Amino acid sequence: MWEKMTMRGEQFFVKASFLEIYNEQLRDLLNGASGILHARWNAKNGFFVEDLMVVECTSIQDLVAVLHEGIKNRHQGSHELNKDSSRSHSILTVYLISQSESKEDNHVYKKYGKISFVDLAGSERLKESQSEGIMAKETGQ
């Protein structure tokens, strides 16, 4: 991806964020010290998560490191049906920004895009999974 982007003669920037929704609370998977985050809306940005860490990725290795860090920090548990069960929903968002300068008017133009990868936690069949207490609460029961 990085090679193709630089071949077009434009400047490209890639950024990423990784967020978890656990028991209806938002957490930054890249900044454990941030505590509970809040979803907001304004006319300029639309919906966004306030104080969510967004990191610049200058290589595919940087992006993979973001993925690994977020997975490491997710709420996980095990039960009778699944040894490694994610206990939360998560959203990895990759932001793409291209910047080019017009030769006609020397104006800098930017294009923005983003793609979100969403992993939804499953709601187990409580009887078969033998989930109790906190794990039962995590399923929404």
Image (cartoon, helix red, strand yellow):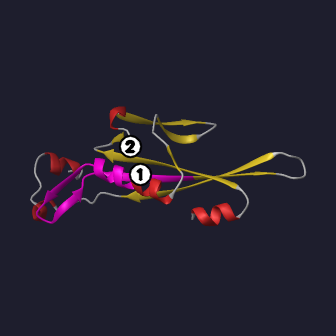
Instruction: Provide the secondary structure element on which disc 2 rests.
Output: loop
Q: Are dots 2 and 1 in contact, CB under 8 Å?
A: yes
Residue on which the image places disc 2:
30
Q: As drawn, is 136 to the left or to the right of 119?
A: left
Residue 111, given in percent of the width and then of the height, sits at: 69, 52
**Left or right: 14 with respect to 65?**
right
First reached walking from the N terminus: tag 2 or tag 1: 2
Residue 76 falls inside the magenta stretch = yes
Q: Nearer the viewer, residue 33 or 51?
A: 33
Give the amino acid type for the residue marked by disc 2 in the picture.
Leu
**In this picture, residue 53 sits left or right of residue 29:** right
Q: Is residue 43 magenta?
A: no
- Three-letter code for the amino acid on which mark 1 is drawn: Val
> Alpha-carbon distance for marks 2 and 1?
7 Å
The residue positioned 37% from the left and 52% from the top of the image is 90
Q: Position of residue 86 (x, y in %)?
A: 26, 56
Q: Which residue is mark 1?
A: 66
The picture places residue 74, in percent across and down from the top left corner, at 29, 49
**So how many labels did they put on this image?**
2
Q: Is residue 85 above or below residue 51?
A: below
In the rendered view of the protein, which quadrant contains the N terminus? bottom right
Residue stretch in magenta:
67-95
Residue drawn at 27 percent across, 60 percent down: 122
